[in-house]
Image (cartoon, grey):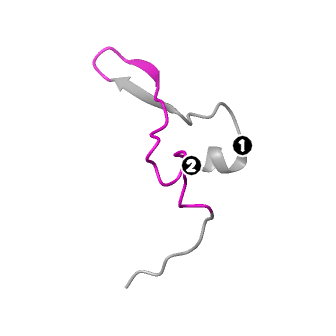
Amino acid sequence: MLKELLGLGESLSGSLLLYDALNTTFRKIKVPPDPACPLCGSQPTITSVQAVEQS
């Protein structure tokens, strides 16, 4: 997450990174955005970052 906030390196946005510990390999898979997602969908309802107080 810090990498994303600082804009360093290659973003994994829209991808799934798989690690195979048995073979010690990585695989990156592209994942299409979900049209119903409240953050990245076609009609987003989450439009800003704000603190949420938990009790």
Q: Quadrant of residue 22?
A: top left
Q: Which residue is mark 2?
A: 1
Q: What is the spatial separation of the Cα atoms under label 1 and label 2, in whole angstroms?
A: 10 Å
Q: Tag 2 or tag 1, which sits nearer the N-term?
A: 2
Q: Nearer the viewer, residue 17 or 40?
A: 40
Say which amino acid is labelled 1.
Answer: Gly
Question: Range of the magenta residues?
Answer: 21-47
Q: Is 47 displayed left or right of 41 in the figure? A: right
* Crowd around label 2: few <14 · some 14–19 · many ≥20 (10 Å): few
Q: Position of residue 37 (x, y in %)?
A: 45, 48
Q: Quadrant of residue 17?
A: top left
Q: Residue furthest bottom?
A: 55
* Crowd around label 1: few <14 · some 14–19 · many ≥20 (10 Å): few
Q: Residue furthest left?
A: 22
Q: Nearer the viewer, residue 52 or 41?
A: 41
Residue shown at 39%/26% (left/top)? Answer: 18
Residue shown at 44%/40% (left/top)? Answer: 34
